[in-house]
Image (tube, rainbow, N blue to C red):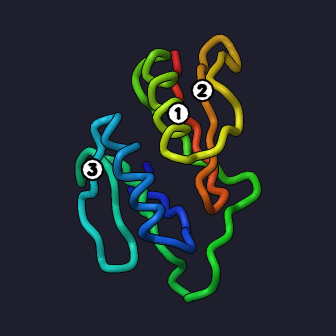
Amino acid sequence: MLAYITLGTNNTEQARALYGPLFAEIGGKELFNNGRLYFYGSGMDKPMIAIGGPYDGQAATFGNGTMAAIPVGSRENVDKVYAKAIELGFTDDGEPGERMPTFYGGYVRDADGNKLVFCHMG
């Protein structure tokens, strides 16, 4: 149902330096770019995350209540990817833990305030 989500940034090179190694932890890579947006994922036929500046040329801002949830396959992987994100410079927005019996997640924000959760459901 989802082709991609775009996370705006005011510093594309900094964002790429954070997201490239982070997504590599879960088998993702930069799939393509158009010079403004850089698309990451595990395949063109799977959901992707794009990083880049807004089309209108205005400053990027995060959406209050907006969050990208990224499934990572296990609770152990949630812990691992969350730790990698913190190591790379993302900020903590909720350490990994069980939020309900079927959801385990760890929350971070990037330098632009975009919120991500690495999660395992089931």
Q: Secondary structure at mark 1?
A: strand
Kindly identify the residue that appears in the image at 24 percent across and 58 percent down. Answer: 31
18 horizontally vs 103: left or right: left
Q: Residue 68 placed where, x, y %? A: 56, 47
Q: Residues within 10 Å of mark 2 (few under 14, many from 20)?
A: many
First in residue order: circle 2 vs circle 1: 2
Look at the numbered discs 2 and 1 and tell me whether their residues touch, using CB distance below 8 Å. yes
User: Which residue is label 1 attached to?
Assistant: 118
User: Which residue is label 3 attached to?
Assistant: 29
Q: Residue 74 placed where, x, y %? A: 43, 18
Q: Quadrant of residue 86?
A: top right
Question: Eyeballing the image, is 14 above or below 89?
Answer: below
Q: Quadrant of residue 80?
A: top left
Q: Please, which residue is most extreme toward the top here?
A: 101
**What label does residue 54 carry, if any?**
none
Question: Eyeballing the image, is 18 above or below 26?
Answer: below
Mark pair 1, 3: CA separation: 16 Å
Q: Residues within 10 Å of mark 1 (few under 14, many from 20)?
A: many
**What label does residue 105 carry, if any?**
2
